[in-house]
Amino acid sequence: QVQLVESGGGLVQAGGSLRLSCAASGISFSIHKMGWYRQAPGKQRELVAVIRSYGLTVYSDSVKGRFTISRDSAKKMVYLQMNSLKPEDTAVYYCNAKRDGGLGYTDYWGQGTQVTVSS
């Protein structure tokens, strides 16, 4: 059974930092690309950052230069370091796993963790 468990969300003032963590189990972690998505109230879920199985990272323009995604294959963990947070970063953040290198693979999702940035 695949499980993705996020942690690290919370309330922070604008300009502050948070580090999100996602613990993965039930998957061959090393062959999955891992991502962070977010969904604000009334908006669609959007990509924040992805790290491929071989380490390549991709960021949305809105977080580039402020957020850093990383992975630890030995621990089956993926992280999102968020710096210089803005009120518009407020959302529920979801961890995602998907097998890398092909089409038609299943998306796995965590339950989400709330990030609230106050102005």
Image (cartoon, rainbow, N blue to C red):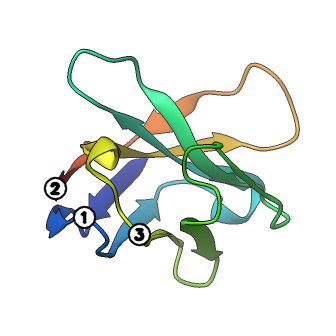
Tell me if mark 2 has few (under 14), some (14-19) or many (20+) residues whose alpha carbon lies within 10 angstroms of its own: few
User: Identity of the amino acid at label 3?
Assistant: Ser
Q: Which residue is mark 3?
A: 84
Residue 21 image offset from top left, x and y in percent: 38, 69
The residue depicted at 25 percent of the width and 64 percent of the height is 14
Residue at image position (70%, 27%) is: 105
In the image, residue 100 sits, relative to residue 57, either above or below, namely above
At x 56%, y 44%, the residue is 62
Identify the residue under disc 1. 14
Q: Earlier in the sequence, mark 2 or mark 3?
A: 3
The residue beneath circle 2 is 119
- Location of residue 112 (image quadrant): top left
**Res 1 visible:** no
Question: Which residue type does callout 2 highlight?
Answer: Ser
Instruction: Indicate the secondary structure of the residue bearing disc 1.
Output: loop
**Vertical relation: 2 (above or below) 45:** below
- Between disc 2 and disc 1, whose residue precedes? 1
- State yes or no: discs 2 and 1 in contact (Cβ < 8 Å): yes
Q: Is residue 56 left or right of residue 67?
A: right
Q: Residue furthest bottom?
A: 74
